[in-house]
Image (cartoon, grey):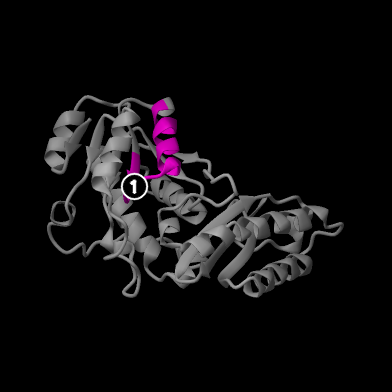
């Protein structure tokens, strides 16, 4: 595996490679990331991964400085997966001058759910992803479904900018007890890790309740959301939201859309102790 930090060197190595597949990451790799590498290999060759902890997507009180950085362990894992290039730019390389040009997603998608609780997050994500896609110029880029809203925003960005890249979604990888794999799971204490699967349990219960509704309407959906939030609070969580939304655009469903059988997804974000976890479940 070639480890490259320079943009021009990266482009030199990829010149003439018009079927490259790309997996951008912030490192601290786990099985979820590695599953995306395998999916990328099914859609293109060679496989390029990146590791870059993007300052632009962290708020002033978030964990940029403490975000886990495990470069050597990540390199070992990527080599075992047969990744061709690891692009690991420094901040100075990727942002040689202040990044004053930003990509701002539309409010109706970027300022809801995660965007409401993490202002500016998706602007930072879109900006770095666009820049990384410009550096790698892949045929395919792979993102995980665990970050459901992020995946949708990046897909729309690629479409609206007519980027010559296909955005492929990888399924969420879970531990045996159902907890979605995440780099931030490492922040959990042993006691917190033991009860963290409750988040997925609540989502499954919500899905069951929605599927069992004899009359699926907005009032019933709202009641299920409120009940799920109350359940998490009772179990010691600090939920930001439990939201049942349309898969197509993450908007709340209308009675008409529900009657027409609109496909739904349940999304949640909640703190357990000091660790904020997100998860989702399609219906």
**25 vs 138: above or below:** below
Quadrant, the N terminus: top left
**156 vs 195: above or below:** above
Number of marks: 1
**Residue at x-position 58% and y-position 54%:** 280
**Residue at x-position 52% and y-position 68%:** 272
Task: Work out whether residue 88 or residue 22 is closer to the camera in this orientation and state it.
Answer: 88
Q: Is residue 213 left or right of residue 129?
A: right
Q: Is residue 80 left or right of residue 174?
A: left
**Residue at x-position 15% and y-position 42%:** 7
**183 vs 64: above or below:** above
Q: Is residue 178 visible?
A: yes
Please identify the quarter of the rendering in which residue 63 is found.
bottom left
Residue 224 in the image, given as x and y percentages of width and height: 74, 66
Q: Which residue is mark 1?
A: 25
Please identify the quarter of the rendering in which residue 36 is found.
top left
**Residue at x-position 60% and y-position 73%:** 236
Is 38 within the magenta?
A: yes
Q: Given the current orientation, which residue lies at the most extreme right position?
A: 214
Residue 27 in the image, given as x and y percentages of width and height: 31, 48
Residue 234 in the image, given as x and y percentages of width and height: 66, 74
Q: Dot 1: within a 10 Å radius of its alpha carbon, few (fewer than 14), some, or many (20 or more) residues?
A: some
Is 44 within the magenta?
A: no
Task: Work out whether residue 205 or residue 104 is closer to the camera in this orientation and state it.
Answer: 205
Task: Work out whether residue 64 or residue 72 is closer to the camera in this orientation and state it.
Answer: 72
* Element carrying mark 1: strand
The boundaries of the magenta stretch are 23-41
């Amino acid at each position: 595996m070639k480890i490259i930090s320079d943009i021009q060197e990266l482009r030199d190595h990829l010149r003439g490679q018009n079927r490259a597949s790309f997996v951008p990451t912030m490192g601290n790799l786990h099985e979820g990331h590695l599953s995306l590498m395998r999916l990328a290999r099914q859609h293109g060759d060679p496989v390029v991964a990146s590791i870059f902890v993007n300052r632009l997507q962290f708020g002033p009180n978030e964990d940029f400085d403490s975000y886990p950085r495990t470069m050597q362990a990540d390199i070992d894992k990527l080599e075992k997966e047969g990744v061709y290039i690891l692009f690991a730019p420094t901040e100075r390389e990727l942002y040689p001058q202040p990044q004053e040009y930003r990509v701002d997603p539309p409010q109706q998608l970027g300022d809801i759910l995660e965007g409401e609780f993490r202002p500016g997050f998706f602007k930072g994500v879109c900006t770095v992803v666009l820049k990384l896609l410009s550096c790698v110029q892949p045929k395919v880029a792979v993102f995980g479904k665990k970050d459901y809203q992020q995946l949708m925003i990046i897909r729309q960005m690629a479409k609206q900018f007519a980027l010559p890249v296909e955005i492929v979604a990888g399924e969420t990888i879970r531990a045996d007890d159902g907890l979605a794999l995440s780099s931030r799971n490492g922040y959990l204490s042993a006691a917190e890790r033991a009860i963290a699967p409750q988040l997925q349990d609540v989502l499954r219960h919500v899905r069951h309740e929605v599927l069992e509704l004899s009359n699926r309407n907005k009032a019933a959906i709202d009641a299920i959301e409120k009940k799920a939030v109350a359940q998490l609070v009772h179990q010691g969580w600090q939920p930001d939201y439990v939201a049942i939304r349309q898969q197509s655009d993450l908007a709340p469903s209308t009675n008409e859309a529900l009657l027409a059988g609109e496909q739904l997804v349940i999304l949640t974000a909640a703190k357990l102790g000091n660790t904020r976890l997100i998860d989702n479940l399609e219906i």
